[in-house]
Amino acid sequence: MQSSSCREPRVVLPLLVLVCVLALSAGCGGGEPASEPRSVTETSGPSEAAGGTPDLSAVKAFLGEHTDRLSSFTEKLNRLAVRYHELAEAERSNLQELWERRAEEVAPLLEDLKATWIDGNPYYERVEGIVAGTPSLAEYDVIIDAGSSAVEDPESAVPFDLTLPDGSVLEQPGNLFNLTEGALWNTLPEEVGRPGTRADLDGDGALEFGEALPDPALLLAASETFEEYAQELDAAGEAWQPTPSDAFTAMVVMVPTMSEYFGQWKTSRFVSGDSASYEAFNVVSRLSDIRDILTGLEVIYEGIEQAVAGADEQRAAQTGQELSDLRSFIAQLYEREQAGKRFTPEQADTLGTEAQERATAIAGQVSQAAAQLGVEIEQ
């Protein structure tokens, strides 16, 4: 991965390829054993559907719970951004004067904005596997979390423009998580968004990472748009009636994306430090995101496990355990990172290769089960 702040377009492996991969990689992976029970959510448990029929009611409920939270988070983020914009307007949008005159109000407001953003991050990541892996919902993943800017890559650019309060337009500026993170922590490139003004927000005499006054117009426009699309996703999720094809497709599409995510982690500040070339994923570790994504994918698998068992009971249990083990593997890496471990880029490559091998085997098993059950995997 280079310095793009978005994810690379996801590639769905052809069904035949995944079936062949299964023969080579089923049972591979090794690594640390799972240290947590397979059920990791409070809103779902193993499917109780009879006759091997997928029960996806828990998947829909899990999505709805998290899109409700996402909507509430974006509403708060926008409310705080409105207040920041009002303060800036009172100083004629002169950020230096804003800081000199209103530092005692601005500093805690920005701290609240950043804390709100961090708290809200998991609400989407836990359902990203559902949203990005479901064809009828996938465009929201591009808008919220995966799309690039037109400057970076017109082919994978977001389908919206950002209109600032003065009427000027930023054409296809990138996804909304990256825009808001970049505005708040001053990591957006100038060709994508307006840079902030550096300020010693914590008063320790040093300008550290993220210490800047965001461009108030950019932050306001991004937060308003974020709230609008979060509400749209919430409504779309409410109307969505999940099908077996949706569930199997999400598993096959989203599980084998580990190398992409580890590449983003490798080039973020969490691995590369001040030499990081990545403009996003510098505030919440990508390991946290991967763990959350896999949590949502476990919810999907619990919904289809009885159907998989109808084709091959032993494989159904094996696939579920390997998926749980993969999430535990990522969770343990994240815990070590949180405890102070700084992984090297070389270690990130090695760990990413192991995670990808495990994920490819899992996706192959699900793909083979889908073929035996006659469930379509959408390409």
Image (spheres, rainbow, N blue to C red):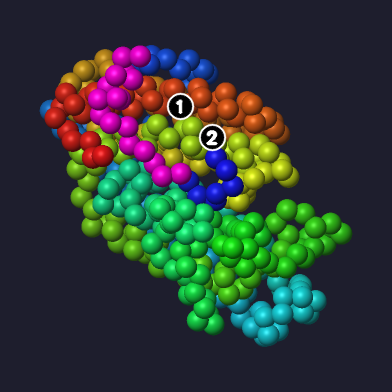
Q: Nearer the viewer, residue 109 or 178?
A: 178
In the rendered image, residue 163, in percent from the top left (x then y), is placed at: 48, 75
Q: Residue at x 38, y 62 (%)?
A: 159
In the rendered image, residue 274, in percent from the top left (x then y), is placed at: 73, 45
Q: Residue at x 33, y 27 (%)?
A: 363
Spatial CA span between label 2 and label 1: 9 Å
Q: Dot 1: what SS?
A: helix
The first of marks 2 and 1 along the sequence is 2
Q: In which quadrant is the N terminus drawn?
A: top right
User: Disc 2 marks which residue?
Assistant: 262
Crowding around mark 2 (Cα neighbors within 10 Å: few <14, some 14 to 19, many 20+) is: many
239 inside magenta stretch: no
Q: In which quadrant is the C terminus drawn?
A: top left
Q: Residue at x 72, y 75 (%)?
A: 95
- The reply, left or right, for residue 255 in relation to residue 61 is right
User: Disc 1 marks which residue?
Assistant: 356
Q: Nearer the viewer, residue 37 or 167?
A: 167
Q: Is residue 186 above or below residue 168?
A: above
